[in-house]
Image: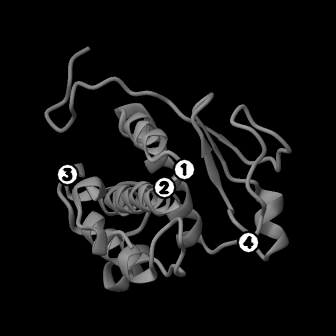
């Protein structure tokens, strides 16, 4: 396969997107609607974005939907690159220590946030994502709530901004970051 100068010779591993409100996935039951408007299942490499669940709450605006899809795709990148496997090994090593487990969860989720804005910033203006749509992300990041599993709103904004301004994925290495940046 001949590569273009602007592409890396890496295999492309497709991901499916399922918009049904499924009761079960190859990864088990989906999280409750109050906890997640979308989720990634590595078994079958599928992003679930249940539209009935979203429409019940009025539906997200376009930027929210794009950020959600890009965040879940970030988990696919983590899975395909081996980050998820390493996370899972560290999770097992934590031996039920909730403090360590929550920190690992935040590192994984904040990295997916960083990957999502990295992707969106690079895709903007190259098709159907207009640059002006991403202005709120450039200013202050995607609005997030403090979460034990996904990090503080402050740190979500920090990692989103890093992704938005990044030139490559190394800017998103939450696993090497100090604890105060993944709280």
Front of the two marks 3 and 2:
2
- Tell me the residue at 50%/67% (across/down): 150
Upstream in sequence: badge 3 or badge 1: 1
**Rounded to the nearest whole Å, what is the CA distance between mark 2 and mark 4?**
32 Å
Q: Is mark 4 in CB contact (under 8 Å) with mark 3?
A: no
The image quarter containing residue 57 is bottom right
Colour basis: one colour
- Alpha-carbon neighbours of circle 3 within 10 Å: few (<14), some, or many (≥20)? few
- Viewed as shown, does residue 74 lie left or right of 62? left
Q: Nearer the viewer, residue 138 or 103?
A: 103
Above/below status of 50 relative to 11: below
Upstream in sequence: badge 4 or badge 1: 4
The image quarter containing residue 9 is top left
Q: Is mark 3 in CB contact (under 8 Å) with mark 1?
A: no
Q: Is mark 1 in CB contact (under 8 Å) with mark 2?
A: yes
- SS category of the residue bearing label 4: loop
**Rounded to the nearest whole Å, what is the CA distance between mark 3 and mark 2?**
23 Å
Q: Nearer the viewer, residue 157 or 49?
A: 157
Q: Which mark is residue 96?
A: 1
Above/below status of 43 relative to 139: above
**Rounded to the nearest whole Å, what is the CA distance between mark 4 and mark 1?**
36 Å
Q: Quadrant of the C terminus?
A: bottom left
Q: Nearer the viewer, residue 171 or 8?
A: 171
Q: Which residue was labeled with disc 3?
A: 170
- Tell me the residue at 36%/55% (across/down): 115
Q: Is mark 3 in CB contact (under 8 Å) with mark 2?
A: no
Upstream in sequence: badge 3 or badge 2: 2
Front of the two marks 4 and 1:
1
Q: Which residue was labeled with disc 2?
A: 101
- SS category of the residue bearing label 3: helix
**Rounded to the nearest whole Å, what is the CA distance between mark 1 and mark 2?**
7 Å
């Amino acid at each position: 396969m001949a590569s273009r100068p602007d592409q890396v010779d890496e295999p492309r591993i497709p991901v499916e997107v399922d918009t049904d409100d499924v009761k079960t996935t190859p990864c088990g039951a989906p999280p409750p609607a109050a906890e997640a408007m979308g989720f990634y299942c590595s078994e079958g490499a599928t992003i679930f974005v249940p539209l009935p669940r979203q429409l019940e709450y009025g539906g997200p605006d376009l930027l929210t939907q794009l950020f959600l899809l890009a965040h879940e795709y970030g988990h696919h990148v983590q899975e395909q690159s081996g980050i998820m496997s390493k996370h899972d090994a560290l999770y097992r090593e934590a031996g039920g220590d909730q403090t360590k487990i929550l920190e690992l969860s935040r590192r994984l989720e904040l990295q997916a946030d960083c990957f999502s804005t990295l992707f969106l910033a690079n895709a903007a203006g190259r098709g159907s994502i207009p640059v002006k749509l991403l202005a709120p992300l450039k200013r202050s990041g995607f609005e997030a709530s403090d979460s034990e599993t996904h990090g503080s709103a402050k740190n979500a904004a920090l990692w989103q901004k890093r992704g938005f301004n990044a030139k490559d994925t190394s800017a998103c290495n939450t696993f090497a970051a100090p604890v105060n940046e993944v709280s």
